[in-house]
Structure formats: structure tokens, C-alpha cells
Amino acid sequence: MKRIFSKGGRSAAIFLLFLAVWETIARLVNIPNWLLPAPSAIVKTGVKVFPDFLPHFIATVKLSLTGYLIGCGFGFLAAVCLHLLPKLKEAVYPFLILSQNIPIIVLAPLLVIWFGFGILPKIIIITLFCFFPVAVAALDGFRQVPHELRYYMEMAGATKSQLFLKLELPGSLPSIFSGLKISAAYSVMGAVVSEWIGAQEGIGVFMTIASSSFQTEKVFVAIFVIMALSLLFFLAIVLLEKRLMKWQPKGDDKR
């Protein structure tokens, strides 16, 4: 835990230095706000529009969490099925990889045509963002369990389900959490993208309205909130990982 916050402090210091340089250049060069507003102007705009921005923020958070849970759930279940059914994995895995070559931003309008402007196409988009990292990470985790332990349990008479529940699943948790952390950041991006294609509220809607009227300060407010929200989701998964994996060696934390 201390290591997380020490690293976070260094990252925060670098980010504050970046903002200070940005503020200085914006003031010295006198860049117009519609082109590149200074951080101070962005903060002032954020405080000013907060009451109007809050409903958009809440809508995006709800959408992100819903899509994240569904996408990660489907990704984990798919990984379990493919791992336990090797023949199915051989047939399906190449298509799983190929599915990531389809640009989501291109697929989004088709989902609207097929499912309308409701919440379903938005959930599908976020699910597509979150599904792949969890599925691939879990499959790699199941495969990387030490063969010596597997052989020992098989010699002791363990069944296939016992091997999975007592060895492969616990041993794959580090890989699974890596996929969960990637998907946590993707879920917010997926929610914003889904809101661009048709929604009445959300950070994506807020950005679209602001950019169409050249209110660049509001666009940057939305960008910084998206970054903060993604980081918050990521840190939540990191803390959950630390809590659930206390048995893992802590040698790295002492560095």
C-alpha cells in the first residue's frame, strides 16, 4: 500500500510540473482560450459548469460500471470455457483475436441500427472494450500454472475440477487482475465512445456539445474528468488485488 502511494506521489509531482509549464507557456504566449486554454481557465470553467456537468458524470459512471461488470464477467466465463474445452479453444481462439481488428468506432453505428438508441448498444460497446483483456489474461494465467504442481496434484488423485479450483484459478489471479486493470481504464473510454453515437446525457454528450460550439475549456474539463475517472477505476482494482492476494510474496514491495 505504501509503495502505491509513494509512486502516486511521484506521478502527481510530475503531473503538477507539467501543468505549471503549460500554465506558464499559455500566459507568456497569450494563447486564446478557444485554441488551448490554460489549466487555471479549465479549473474555473469546471467549477462554473459543475452543476450542469454532474448529471453527465453520474450517467457515465453508471454506464461504465455496468458495461465493465458485464464485459469482465463474459470475458472470464469465456476464458474458463475455452480452458476447460481445449478443442473449443483451438476453434474459437483465432476468431477471438480477429475480433479485435474490428474498429469499435466503426461498429458503433451498426449497433445503433440493429438495437436502436437505448442503453443496449452502449453496453455492448463497453463489453467489447472490456471482454478481450480479461479473456486473454485469464487464459494465459490458467496456462502458466507450474507444471510441477499440476503433476503433483494429479499424482495425488485430484480431479479436473479440483485442479482448476485449487490450483489453476488461484494461480491465475495475478494475470486476471492485470486484465481487470486494463479493462477498468477501457470501460470509461468505451462509455464515452458509446455516448458519442447517440445519448441524452453523459460525458461524451457534454464533450460533443462543447466541441461543436468551440468551448474548448469545457472539452478539457471533460478530458481531465475522464482521465481521473479511469485512474480511480484502475486504483480500485489495484486495492482489491492487494486485499484478495495477501498470500502473494511481497518481495517487490520492499524495493
Image (cartoon, rainbow, N blue to C red):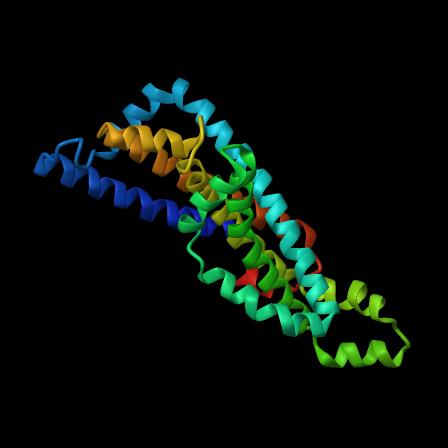
Residue 179: percent from left, percent from top = 56, 57
Residue 120 visible (yes or no): yes
Determine the residue located farthest toward the front in the rendered image. Answer: 113
**Image quadrant assignment for residue 219:** top left
**In the image, is 173 to the left or to the right of 5?**
right
Residue 198: percent from left, percent from top = 43, 33
Residue sitting nearer the eye, 71 or 34: 71
Identified at 60% across, 69% down, the residue is 93
How many badges with numbers are in the image? 0
Determine the residue located farthest toward the right in the rendered image. Answer: 157
Q: Is residue 170 above or below residue 55?
A: below
Residue sitting nearer the eye, 113 or 242: 113
Identified at 55% across, 41% down, the residue is 123
Determine the residue located farthest toward the left in the rendered image. Answer: 29
Q: Is residue 27 above or below residue 153?
A: above
Q: Is residue 209 above or below residue 93?
A: above
Identified at 54% across, 52% down, the residue is 181
Residue sitting nearer the eye, 195 or 6: 195
Identified at 13% across, 34% down, the residue is 27
Residue 144 visible (yes or no): no
Residue 200: percent from left, percent from top = 44, 26
Residue 137: percent from left, percent from top = 59, 63
